[in-house]
Image (spheres, rainbow, N blue to C red):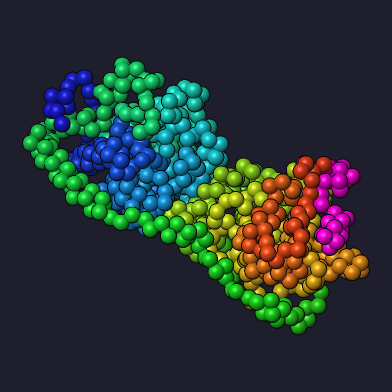
């Protein structure tokens, strides 16, 4: 490093050293800042040598706030949600040089993900430095969620969210901030504003170029500003923010004015949109050079002493990088591990076991509705595990328990700390559940993801993130979440109360998706979801909530219906109807009519859409030789296409006819009853297809 440049009067002055910060601390701050800068530069060299770090976003120009942020985290206690530029933050928070390089080189021993996640996404879940998504700002919801858990469990930790300024343009950031303020949660939002969202200047992103000015109206929020290139100013402000949050006053926001000395990332050519004058101005605010000049000017260190610190840093960097480079690459065969947290999906019951456990309780002769079965199972599971929580829209409003009263009585028995309402913000509902689960492995969260499945779409970004958390973290974090959604039509609900969304979400690896057709399965599948780690989307056919078709005796307490196990509802020899949800009952009614015409049908109720029961499908198709795949959703792109493909690929030689798909029309569901009936699959559609298939 050139001393004359460091001492140049053209550098912006750093300011005064805080009285409470001893000179020894300043020396250590310089050591960390120089080590971070050296590591950042080495990352760029790895990329040029094609040795790794295929994505690199330099932290140069952000070191003041990043050092202050990392040092403010209580190691192993507080929760830190860094973003992709936070190299110095995680170094100051306790990650080693070697661990950071392991991430950059995508090695098997990378503590963030074992090479599964993108480089420059630094994490160490073992010390609560969180593995976050590449969707900018989405971790704001997770930071708020874990802060809610801290509050509920009376913890003394705080949660730190870090991002660039542009991420605040995302709608879910507003949802996160609003929720944190409303609930007075212990979370510190750190916004590192370098003036650009890749190439888009901040004035094109925000009404206020000082991003914090957008949020002054939020109640309980402490808003602070600092020079993010000055460690002294950043340190003072971070201490104020942390004190405010730790005292339970609510969230704090630190807006740090930074500069981006380099390009956004290795794939960005910033000279195409930034002038040389602007870049020179950024270099004058270089946090490292300003701290070095300050130390020389104040006599804190001599040139020789700084040179010794720098030399030791480079020696350490060489030593730890050599170890990281020698680390093993990920095993390609490991790529399928951790898609699901529990591959067994709990108890592997046979149908005989199921029938035995379904024997009625003494004195319990009356069948229950599907709605009551779900409600009763929720109560039982909440009693079994005190670390279970429920939130969503309308789920805890005095005597009301959701739009369909499925959660009736939950608030009264378990209290508002465990059962509470959420705003109409589906991304917030699911995203905070993801964060909440990070506090402890024994936590299960049930969310009513939306009042109707039709309104769940805003949460899809969080559903994708949450689905691959276990895989992306290499098995280190499992969000134990049940997403309840009232699904399907036949209620004259029109376009936004009749959608069947299972096919749209079935393409997301890591999700379990179930859809019961009977009360006994509704309770048994829900129990299994509560006792199986990971994410289960629990689709409830609302048409069947109180319908006599779905009523059964309530299952014995020890019964869990294994996720991924189908049930044969009717036996036949001539053709197989493979279905789930509402259409199970249409299939059973059609099968009775076909039987009177001499056609005997197997009716296989999948119960689980993902994973689905390949063995049961194989058994029924081998027996009958003819397969009808039936579902309520529109035909094109429906899940029936996946089932048909499996049958065609794996069972072709056992087929005596082409696989027949029967589904609703490829059109939205109209509100008028005659339009709904014309759109949704009917018993007559099944009869017509069954007769044709039988004659083939």
Percent coordinates x, y for residue 537 in the rendering: 62, 56
In the displayed structure image, the side of residue 109 where residue 545 appears, left or right? right
- Nearest the viewer among 611 and 126 is 611
Residue occupying the point 59% across, 45% down: 460
| Residue 681 highlighted magenta (yes or no) | yes
State the count of labels.
0
Relative to 570, does residue 70 appear above or below in the rendering? above
Residue 301 in view (yes/no):
yes
Q: Choose top left, top right, bottom left or bottom right for residue 326.
A: bottom left
Residue occupying the point 22% across, 41% down: 35
Relative to 303, does residue 351 appear above or below in the rendering? below
Relative to 550, does residue 58 appear above or below in the rendering? above
Percent coordinates x, y for residue 643 in the rendering: 67, 57
In the displayed structure image, the side of residue 632 where residue 508 appears, left or right? left
Residue occupying the point 68% across, 47% down: 637
Which of the image's four quarters has the C terminus? bottom right
Which of the image's four quarters has the N terminus? top left
Percent coordinates x, y for residue 389 in the rendering: 58, 59
Q: Which residues are magenta?
A: 671-696
- Nearest the viewer among 234 and 500 is 500
Residue occupying the point 37% across, 44% down: 119
Percent coordinates x, y for residue 346 in the rendering: 57, 70
| Residue 376 highlighted magenta (yes or no) | no
Residue 411 in view (yes/no):
no
Q: Choose top left, top right, bottom left or bottom right for residue 262.
A: top left
- Nearest the viewer among 518 and 43 is 43
């Amino acid at each position: 490093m050139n001393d004359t440049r460091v001492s140049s009067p053209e550098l912006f002055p750093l300011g005064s050293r805080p009285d409470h910060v001893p000179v020894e601390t300043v020396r250590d701050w310089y050591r960390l800042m120089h080590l971070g800068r050296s590591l950042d530069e080495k990352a760029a060299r790895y990329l040029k040598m094609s040795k790794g770090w295929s994505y690199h976003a330099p932290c140069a120009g952000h070191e003041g706030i990043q050092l202050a942020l990392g040092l403010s985290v209580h190691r192993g206690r507080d929760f830190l949600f860094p973003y992709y530029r936070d190299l110095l933050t995680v170094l100051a928070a306790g990650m080693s040089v070697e661990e950071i390089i392991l991430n950059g080189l995508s090695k098997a021993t990378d503590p963030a993900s074992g090479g599964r996640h993108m480089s420059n996404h630094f994490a160490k879940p073992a010390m609560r430095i969180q593995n976050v998504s590449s969707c900018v700002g989405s971790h704001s919801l997770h930071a708020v969620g874990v802060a809610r858990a801290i509050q509920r469990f009376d913890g003394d930790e705080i949660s730190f969210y870090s991002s660039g300024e542009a991420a605040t343009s995302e709608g879910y950031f507003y949802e996160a901030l609003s929720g944190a303020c409303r609930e007075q949660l212990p979370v510190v939002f750190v916004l590192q504003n370098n003036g650009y969202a890749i190439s888009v200047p901040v004035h094109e992103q925000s009404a206020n170029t000082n991003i914090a000015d957008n949020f002054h109206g939020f109640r309980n929020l402490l808003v602070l500003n600092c020079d993010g290139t000055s460690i002294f100013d950043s340190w003072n402000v971070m201490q104020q923010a942390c004190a405010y949050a730790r005292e339970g006053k609510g969230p704090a926001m630190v807006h740090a004015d930074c500069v981006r000395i380099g390009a956004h990332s290795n794939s960005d050519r910033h000279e195409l949109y930034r002038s040389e004058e602007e870049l020179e101005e950024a270099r004058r605010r270089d946090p490292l050079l300003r701290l070095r000049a300050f130390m020389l000017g104040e006599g804190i260190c001599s040139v020789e002493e700084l040179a010794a610190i720098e030399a030791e840093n480079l020696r350490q960097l060489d030593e730890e990088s050599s170890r990281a480079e020698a680390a093993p690459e990920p095993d390609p065969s490991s790529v399928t591990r951790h898609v699901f947290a529990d591959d067994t999906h709990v108890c592997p019951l046979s149908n005989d076991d199921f029938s035995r456990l379904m024997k009625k309780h003494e004195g319990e002769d009356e069948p229950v509705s599907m709605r009551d079965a779900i409600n009763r199972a929720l109560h039982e599971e909440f009693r079994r595990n005190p670390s279970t929580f429920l939130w969503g829209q309308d789920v805890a409003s005095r005597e009301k328990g959701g739009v369909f009263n499925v959660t009736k009585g939950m608030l009264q028995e378990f209290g508002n700390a465990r059962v509470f309402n959420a705003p109409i913000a589906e991304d917030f509902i699911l995203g905070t559940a993801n964060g909440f689960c990070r506090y402890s492995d024994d936590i299960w969260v049930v969310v009513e993801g939306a009042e109707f499945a039709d309104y769940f779409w805003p949460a899809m970004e969080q559903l994708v993130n949450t689905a691959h958390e276990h895989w992306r973290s290499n098995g280190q974090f499992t969000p134990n979440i049940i997403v309840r959604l009232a699904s399907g039509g036949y209620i004259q609900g029109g376009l936004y109360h009749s959608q069947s969304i299972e096919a749209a979400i079935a393409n997301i690896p890591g999700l379990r998706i179930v859809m019961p057709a009977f009360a006994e399965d509704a309770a048994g599948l829900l129990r299994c979801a509560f006792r199986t780690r990971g994410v289960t989307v629990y689709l409830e056919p609302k048409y069947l909530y109180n319908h006599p078709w779905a009523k059964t005796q309530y299952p014995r307490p020890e019964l869990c219906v294994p996720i991924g196990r189908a049930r044969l509802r009717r036996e036949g020899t001539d053709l197989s109807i493979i279905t789930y949800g509402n259409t199970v009952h249409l299939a059973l009614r059609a099968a009775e009519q076909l039987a009177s015409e001499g056609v005997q049908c197997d009716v296989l109720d999948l119960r689980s859409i993902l994973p689905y029961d390949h063995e049961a499908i194989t058994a029924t198709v081998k027996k009958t030789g003819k397969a009808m795949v039936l579902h309520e959703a529109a035909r094109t792109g429906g899940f029936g296409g996946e089932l048909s493909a499996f049958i065609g690929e794996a069972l072709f030689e056992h087929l005596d006819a082409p696989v027949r798909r029967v589904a609703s029309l490829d059109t939205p569901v109209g509100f008028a009853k005659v339009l709904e009936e014309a759109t949704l699959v009917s018993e007559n559609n099944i009869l017509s297809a069954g007769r044709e298939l039988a004659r083939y």
